Image: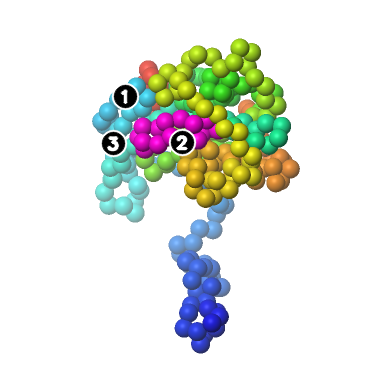
Amino acid sequence: MDPGDPSSGEPSTEERVPGAAVSGAASAADWTGPVADQVEPHAVVSMIERFRGRVWSVRSDTVDLGPDHEHPVVRDLVVHPGAVGVLALDDDDRVLLVRQYRHPVGMYLFEAPAGLLDVAGEDPWITAQRELAEEAGLVAARWHVLVDFLNSPGGSTETFRCFLARGLSPLPGGRPHTGEAEELHLPQAWVPLDEAKDLVLAGRLQNPTTGMGVLAAWAARAGGWRGLRPVDAPWPVRAAVLAAGRVFLPDGAV
C-alpha cells in the first residue's frame, strides 16, 4: 500500500514530519529573525562556586530570565578553559586519528589531536600547533579555521575551535616525550576522509572533535575548500565568554 494513499490508513509523508510548515501566517512562536546564534546573556543575580579542580570548576548561577518569568532560576555550569582541535589531512586526503583512553566514559576513542586553552593569552592557533606536535609529532604548512562549536552549552562554558592542517611533515626528532598517563602512548590511524565520514555517520566514531571535524572537512572539500577561514579569523563567541568571566584557567577565571 502507498502510505500516501488515504485508503491505506497510513499517514502521508507530509503528515509524519514533526513541525512541518503550514501555509498561511506564521504563528506567534515562529522565529522570523536571522538564523544565527546570538550573544545575549541574561543577568546573573548571584553565583556560588561549588567545586574548583585542576582543569575546571563548577558553579551555581542564579539567573534572571526577564519580565516573563516570575522568579529567577538556578543553573549549574562547568566553567571550562575552552579547547582547540586539529583535523590533519595528508596529501592523500587521509585524516589523522589518535587512539586515546577517556576515563569518564571508560572507552578508547579515535580522536583528532586536541588540547585545552589553558595558557592565558595564548593564540588558539599556537595551541593547535603545539598539540599537533605533541600528540602526533607533525608540523603543517597550511592552516585554516575549519569549524567552531560549543561542546555542551546546556551545562558547560567550553568553546571549541577546530583547525584544518595540511601540508604535513614529520617534526624533526619525532614526537616529543611530553605525554604522560593516557597520553603516553597514542597509536595513530590514517583514515581516508570518505571512510572517516561513513564511520562518523554510522556511530562508530563518537568523539565530538572527530565528528565535527571530519564532517566539516568532508563538506568543505565537496565545496572546493571555498569558505575556509584564516587562522586569525574572529571568534566572537570565545570573546564573549571571556568577557563574561566564564573561562577557567589554572590561576582562575579571566
SS at circle 1: loop
The amino acid pointed to by label 2 is: Leu
Marks 1 and 3, the one that precedes in the sequence: 1
Query: Relative to residue 15, is residue 222 depicted above or below?
Result: above
Quadrant of residue 133 in the image? top right
Q: Nearer the viewer, residue 228 or 180?
A: 180
Q: Is residue 100 magenta?
A: yes
Quadrant of residue 171 in the image? top right
Residue numbers of the magenta segment: 97-112
Q: Is residue 240 visible?
A: no
Marks 1 and 2, Cα distance to the nearest angstrom?
Answer: 24 Å
The amino acid pointed to by label 1 is: Gly
Marks 3 and 2, Cα distance to the nearest angstrom?
Answer: 31 Å
Mark 1 touching mark 3, by CB under 8 A? no
SS at circle 3: strand
Task: Please state, as top left, top right, bottom left or bottom right, where the C terminus lies in the image.
Answer: top left
Q: Nearer the viewer, mark 1 or mark 3?
A: 1
What residue would you read off at disc 2?
A: 109
Residue 28, percent from left and from top: 46, 64
What residue would you read off at disc 1?
A: 53
Count neighbours of disc 1 (C-alpha within 10 A) and say few if under 14, some if 14 to 19, many if 20 or more.
few
Residue 165, percent from left and from top: 64, 29
Marks 3 and 2, the one that precedes in the sequence: 3
Count neighbours of disc 2 (C-alpha within 10 A) and say few if under 14, some if 14 to 19, many if 20 or more.
some
Count neighbours of disc 3 (C-alpha within 10 A) and say few if under 14, some if 14 to 19, many if 20 or more.
some
What residue would you read off at disc 3?
A: 60
